[in-house]
């Protein structure tokens, strides 16, 4: 479990191209939600990377003090849960990048109205809502309701 080098969404070529289009004052379009989503994803990535680094540090300290496996195991479990959250976040990031690519393409081919349709980030918003709900307590096992 290691923190990986992450690339900010704003550094992706497709997202940059979309920012250029929607950032043009002549466009008179407000996509503040898009900016907020990108910033949110970037912040989440940074926080998860910090968690990975901290967990690695704690695990190493426990191993150095020759603690038994039962002491280290909860940190392994936390690392697995954090990895799962990171995977979901990467999925959201991929949707944003793909949506940006489609938005730029639509704008170049058909103009502003096509851009508006391509910029429907409902799928991204739903993914973020799902991610947020799983973050309420990401380190605890998800409870499955028992069938009645």
Image: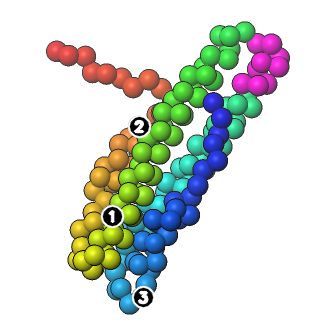
- Identify the residue at horizontal 73%, vertical 28% (top origin): 58
Task: Sort mark 3 into few (<14), some (14-19) or many (20+) by Cα contacts within 10 Å.
Answer: few
Residue that badge 3 annotates? 25
At numbered mark 3, what does the secondary structure look like: helix, strand or loop?
Answer: helix
Give left or right: position of 105 versus 43. Answer: left
> Mark 1 or mark 2, which has the lower sequence index?
1
In the image, residue 130 lies at what x, y percent? 35, 43
Circle 1 residue: 102
Label 1 and label 3: CA atoms lie apart by 21 Å
Q: Name the residue under label 2.
A: 134
Mark 1 is surrounded, within 10 Å at the Cα level, by few (under 14), some (14 to 19) or many (20 or more) other residues, namely some
Q: Residue 68 carries which label?
A: none
How crowded pointer 2 is (Cα within 10 Å; few <14, some 14-19, many 20+) is rated as some
Residue drawn at 58 percent across, 55 percent down: 7
Q: Is mark 1 on a helix, strand or loop?
A: helix
Q: What stretch is highlighted in magenta?
A: 59-67
Q: In which quarter of the image is residue 122?
A: bottom left
- Quick one: quadrant of the N terminus? top right
At horizontal 59% and vertical 29% (from top left) the residue drawn is 79
Give the mark toward the camera: 3 or 2. 3
């Amino acid at each position: 479990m290691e923190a990986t080098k992450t690339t900010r969404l704003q550094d992706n070529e497709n997202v940059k191209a979309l920012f250029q289009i929607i950032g043009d004052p002549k466009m008179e379009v407000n996509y503040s939600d898009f900016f907020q989503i990108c910033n949110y994803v970037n912040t989440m990535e940074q926080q998860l990377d910090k968690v990975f680094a901290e967990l690695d540090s704690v695990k190493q300290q426990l191993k150095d003090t020759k603690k038994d496996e039962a002491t280290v195991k909860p940190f392994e479990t936390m690392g697995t849960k954090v990895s799962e959250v990171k995977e979901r976040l990467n999925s959201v990031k991929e949707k944003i990048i793909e949506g940006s690519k489609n938005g730029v393409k639509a704008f170049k081919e058909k103009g502003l109205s096509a851009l508006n349709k391509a910029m429907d980030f409902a799928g991204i918003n739903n993914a973020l809502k799902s991610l947020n709900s799983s973050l309420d307590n990401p380190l605890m096992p998800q409870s499955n309701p028992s069938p009645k």
